Image: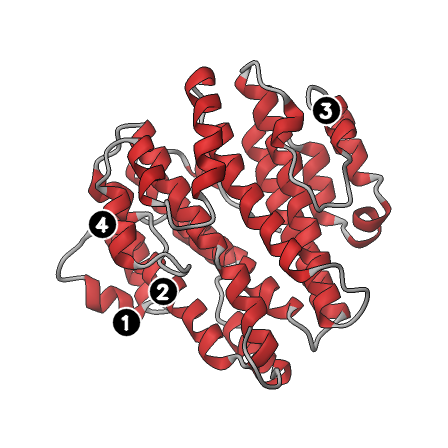
Amino acid sequence: MSAGASNPEFVNARVRSRRATLFADEDYRKLIRMGPSGIARFMEEREYEDEINELGARFSGVDLIEYALNRNLAKHFDDLLDWSEGRLYDLIARYLRKFDVWNVKTVIRGIYTDTPAEEIRTDLIRAGELDDALLDRLVDAGEIEDVIELLNRTIFYEPLSAAFEVYEESGTLVPLENALDRTFYERLLADLGRPQEGPEAMYVEFLQAEIDFRNARNALRLARSGADLDPSAFYIEGGTLFTESELNRLVNDRDELVTHITEDRTYGDRLSTALDQLREADSLIQFEHALDAALLEYSDRLSSIYPVSVSAVLSYILAKEREVENIRAIARGREVGLSEAEIEDELVVL
């Protein structure tokens, strides 16, 4: 734990300034009509000038865009930690460990799909606690079992080891990915306890929402996979929307699952646009994007209710992630020749 007083007013002022520079939905509509070189120029004219200039001599096309996005994301989140003091620093640092989960998932998925090491390395976001040397060793491991062994001094080793047998039996990455998510959220909430009021209560409320929407996503993915897996084994403790038995019941009924979310008092009272998207989603990818949009809208709502708390920082982190993911989806879509309508389906917009 960091000692000393927190400084949320200062950090939130800086975050508001950064948030004002994020791409708007209209910017994404412009990018959809551009090729990779045009996207890179557009980025250079906005928030990404330093990264495009620094990386432009070594990379081009979509590779340049990918590296610039991930380096910029890590820089912004490093700035959050540089600005923060005391308990606020602790809360932000703990949340940024989610990028350790992202990076391990990225490596495991890359190995599973025989993706070249350099392509895997492009997708890493170096904003968590796993250092660059370990991340590079993970990318070069070659086998999922070797990745797990390299993590033997981290909190992920035992959960991944336990999930590996289920992965081998099922042939799906769901057990491994869920082990990472469960470890991150359950460890984070256990360290926090359950504060009833103040900034940390808002932090917990945000985490509960993230767990709720991840449980919903996992339920749909599990149903779609067709694998003979026990849904309760993939339930993440700590949310408020589902009990374990409710999620088991809803896993094969998307309409009922959507109704359960939209009629929940917490989300139904605070969300509007995103829940409409959820009701109208007619594919798994649209459903997942609608869940992402719902979490964004919910985090914005929390930050407006509690402006001097960590909520505004967490909302900004999600919004910045959304920008990076949207630009990446547009660049990759243009590279493989998707139509504008198909690329638009890949975006998270409110």
Of badges 1 and 2, nearer the viewer stands 2
Instruction: Please name the residue that numbered disc 4 is placed on.
Output: 61
Q: Is the N terminus in the top left, top right, bottom left or bottom right quadrant?
A: bottom right
Distance from the alpha carbon under mark 3 to that under mark 4: 44 Å
**Position of residue 221 measured from the top left corner of the image (x, y, whole percent):** 57, 27
Q: Residue at x 65, y 54 (%)?
A: 190
Distance from the alpha carbon under mark 1 to that under mark 2: 9 Å
Of badges 3 and 4, nearer the viewer stands 3
> From the viewer's perspective, is 182 left or right of 163?
right
Residue 133 lies in quadrant: bottom left
Q: Evaluate if marks 3 and 2 touch, with contact meaning CB atoms under 8 Å apart.
A: no
Residue type at mark 3? Asn
**Label 1: few (<14), some or many (≥20) within 10 Å?**
some
User: Nearer the N terminus, badge 1 or badge 2?
Assistant: 1
User: Nearer the N terminus, badge 1 or badge 4?
Assistant: 1
Of badges 4 and 2, nearer the viewer stands 2
Q: Residue at x 17, y 54 (%)?
A: 59
Distance from the alpha carbon under mark 1 to that under mark 3: 48 Å
> From the viewer's perspective, is 195 left or right of 169?
right
**Position of residue 143 measured from the top left corner of the image (x, y, whole percent):** 27, 31
Q: Residue at x 49, y 81 (%)?
A: 83
User: Nearer the N terminus, badge 4 or badge 2?
Assistant: 4
Q: Evaluate if marks 1 and 4 touch, with contact meaning CB atoms under 8 Å apart.
A: no
Q: Residue at x 28, y 55 (%)?
A: 67
**Position of residue 39 measured from the top left corner of the image (x, y, whole percent):** 32, 55
Instruction: Please name the residue that numbered disc 2 is placed on.
Output: 72
Instruction: Please name the residue that numbered disc 3 is placed on.
Output: 248
